[in-house]
Image (spheres, helix red, strand yellow):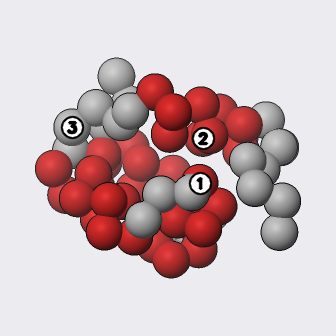
Amino acid sequence: MYSGHDLRAFRESRAWSLRQFSSIVGVSVKTLQVMEKQNKEVPLQLRLALAAIKAGVHPIDE
């Protein structure tokens, strides 16, 4: 399971703000805040975006 705490650790390990991270993965800042605080399982679509980032492919090219 990939939880909200894992999501926060992932974001912080890259020194990304919530705003930067939300732009990269296409999820609102508020949604990310809720996910990180509630520590529930991260939805599949977001886990796939994180896997792409880990592989060196950003879901959204800036």
Left or right relative to 46: residue 42: left
Residue type, label 1: Val
Q: Are marks 1 and 2 in contact (CB under 8 Å)?
A: yes
Residue type, label 3: Lys
Residue at image location 83% in from the left, 69% down from the top? 62
Quickly name the residue at label 2: 50
Residue at image location 27% in from the left, 51% down from the top? 35
Residue density around tag 3, few if under 14, some if 14–19, many if 20 or more, within 10 Å: some
Name the quadrant containing residue 36: bottom left
Spot the residue most to the top: 1
Q: Is residue 20 above or below residue 53?
A: below
- Residue 15 visible in image: no
Name the quadrant containing residue 48: top right
Quickly name the residue at label 1: 25
Residue at image location 21% in from the left, 37% down from the top? 40
Left or right relative to 62: residue 5: left
Q: Secondary structure at mark 2?
A: helix
Q: Secondary structure at mark 1?
A: helix
Quickly name the residue at label 3: 40
Residue type, label 2: Leu
Residue density around tag 2, few if under 14, some if 14–19, many if 20 or more, within 10 Å: many
